[in-house]
Image (tube, rainbow, N blue to C red):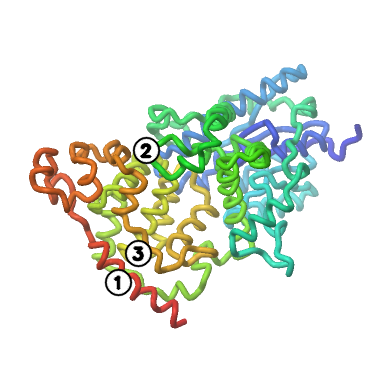
Amino acid sequence: MQKKYDTGLMWFRRDLRLEDNAALYQALKSCHQVFCVFVFDKDILNNLPRADRRVEFIRESVVELDEGLRKLAGKHQIQHGGLMVPHAVAGDAIPLLAHRLSVDAVFTNHDYEPQAQARDAAVQAKLEEENRAFHTFKDHVIFENAEVLTLAGKPYSVFTPYKNAWLKKVDGFYLCAYPVEKYASALAPRPAQHQIAVPTLKTLGFEETNLKTLKIPTGMSGGEQLFEDFLGRMTDYGDTRNFPAVKGPSYLGVHLRFGTVSIRKLASTALERQKNGDEGAAVWLSELIWRDFYAQILSNFPHAATEAFKPEYDLIDWEKGAVAQALFEAWCAGRTGYPLVDAAMAQINQTGYMHNRLRMVVASFLTKDLGLDWRWGERYFAEKLNDFDLTSNNGGWQWASSSGCDAQPYFRIFNPTSQSEKFDPEGKFIRRYLPVLAGLPGSAIHAPWLAKPLELASAGVELGQNYPRPVVQHDEARALTLQRYAVVKKS
């Protein structure tokens, strides 16, 4: 088969898998020889805490990716296959490597975040100066940018019609897997200077986290393991997904974030099961579509990355000063006095994961009970979440604060106590993450400040000592929020 290029460079980023990888497929199909690289990007890593589960997850996944490439090359009698893994500034390293290897083209998958797009534009410019091509491909979502539009040719800003249009448009073409292995004979051996092991966390300047203790499976095999486990529970997803003490979610968020699973594989499986009447699969597919929805929102409305999607919501006078800072610190530390909120914050602080129902609860509490700017919470989640994704995180926070597209109405304010009673009725989740409250009876654990003195004493709970009193009264906070949001109606 005639190929367009002699030599290419595959640049892995948030697509750390071999199976069904769009850019890898296109590189192998288009080039006689393909080198593979992953860059531990100093521009990104230098801004992260020294103990970061995401860096450890990526590092372990890159190790598996390197092993997979070497095995795949070996099947075609290619010696010294594998991944080149420099620790450098990616924007400089990729053009330099392309020059040294004399490649004709660089292949990679789209990254939709503003900083990544600026980096890619700079890389493309440097490559074009030396007459090297730069090709990027859709791999992270099913539909991107302007692929799903209204009849008027405009991007959707309301989810349900977007979902209906998504379902109407999707077919085998968009869900078809890329047969990477079919063209794997084009894999190139690594140059001698790059035949070295993947850098250790210590070499990268990072410390080990509790990732292994938490038993979070990494890499392609980890994503496959979790998906196989979820297949047996998918039918019940609609009934179990809102209860944090129940094994309801797929737990695939971090694998979708770093591309150790294929979104096409997940969506096609869910769609097929939905067609066969599986209601749980239909609910889960909706969650995958929400992911596409938020990605196209940020692409079509880039102001939402830093500002309210609905401009009038930037008129809100959020709490400021020392009191606001103290409330925020209490929220971050899980010391608000509301057990479900505090248990959720303990979960994210200890594990880097937070159940989706709880993400809504704590976001509503931050913005509508504490009166704090949603961007404070967005930044905290960006630092803590293993599965942090700018588009989904931004969309979720703007939804909770009512400032985003198709967001909940501003007057819809979650009551943290009733949410606790409804979604953690026996207090199992609270007891797991707030052991100080474990001895309280079922009803008291949702609102310790209402518990009888004898109940508190027998459980060893001392309000204001080993567990805080509520930092705000919900009813009073709700009234203040309605006043605060009144500016939206006047605009």
Q: Which residue is mark 3?
A: 368
Q: Nearer the viewer, residue 235 or 32?
A: 235
**Label 2 vs 3, first from the N-terminus:** 2
**Residue at the image position 44 percent from the left and 82 percent from the top:** 490
Q: Nearer the viewer, residue 266 or 375?
A: 266
| Mark 3 neighbour density, 10 Å: few (under 14) some (14–19) many (20 or more) | many
Is label 3 in contact with label 1 (beta carbons under 8 Å)? no
Amino acid beneath label 1: Leu
Q: Residue 227: x, y in percent?
A: 56, 32
Q: Residue 110: x, y in percent?
A: 67, 48
**Label 3 vs 1, first from the N-terminus:** 3
Q: Which residue is mark 2?
A: 245
Give the spatial CA distance, label 3 vs label 1: 8 Å
**Residue at the image position 65 percent from the left and 52 percent from the top:** 120
Amino acid beneath label 3: Lys
Q: Which residue is mark 1?
A: 480
Give the spatial CA distance, label 2 vs label 3: 25 Å
Q: Residue 248: x, y in percent?
A: 46, 37
| Mark 1 neighbour density, 10 Å: few (under 14) some (14–19) many (20 or more) | some
2 or 3: mark nearer the eye: 2
Describe residue 315's horizontal placement relative to residue 172 as left or right.
left
Amino acid beneath label 2: Ala
Q: Is residue 61 visible?
A: no
Image quadrant in which you'd find residue 174: top right
